Image: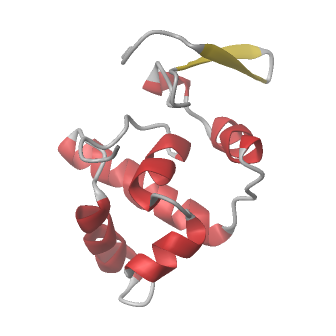
Amino acid sequence: MASSEIYRYLSIEGKKIGLDPEGFLVDMGDWSPAVAEALAAEEERILTEDHWEVIEVLRDFYSRYEMAPAMRPLVKSVGLALGAEKGKSLHLMRLFPDSPAKVGARLAGLPKPANCL
């Protein structure tokens, strides 16, 4: 599923992965945990177990609704899946500063959420 033009490539395990101008995957089928790690490394971010839990929630949300969640649905989904303590904006902001929905979706290999700038 191609979402836009290729702006640059990320090389993972000998494969060239196309990225759009904002660093989102051009083809969601190219996603793998290694791709997520490489995207995170570009931002000098190390993915912890807490990051992976949220990435899993994001990918599950996409598989159900065929869209990446904006912030409010993300907070609600994380709360339902991982408990009230993790389902808070502050927790998500610590994990994915700037824009949890946008950064999280990018690392999860999903399209940019519709309401994110």
- Placement of 57 over or under 4, stated as above or below: below
Residue 15, quarter of the rendered image: top right
Farthest residue toward the bottom?
A: 85
In the image, residue 75 sits, relative to residue 35, either above or below, namely below
- Residue occupying image coordinates x 80% and y 16%: 14
In this orientation, which residue lies closer to the viewer: 70 or 15? 70
The answer to whether residue 40 is left or right of residue 19 is right
Q: Which quadrant of the figure contains the N terminus?
A: top left
> Residue 20, position in %: x, y?
50, 21
Foreground: 55 or 96? 96
* Vertical position of residue 14 compared to residue 23: above or below: above
Q: Specify whether 46 is left or right of 24.
A: right
Residue 84 location in percent, x, y? 36, 89
Q: Is residue 7 left or right of residue 59?
A: right
The residue lying at 35 percent from left, 43 percent from top is 117
Q: How is the image coloured?
A: secondary structure
- The image quarter containing residue 4 is top left
Compared across the picture, whether 6 is left or right of 74 comes to: right
Location of residue 52 (image quadrant): bottom right
Q: Residue furthest top?
A: 5
Estimate the x, y position of residue 73 in percent, counting from the top left.
23, 63
Q: Position of residue 114 (x, y in %)?
A: 24, 41
Residue shown at the point (40%, 60%) measured from the top left: 57
Q: Closer to the camera, 113 or 51?
A: 113
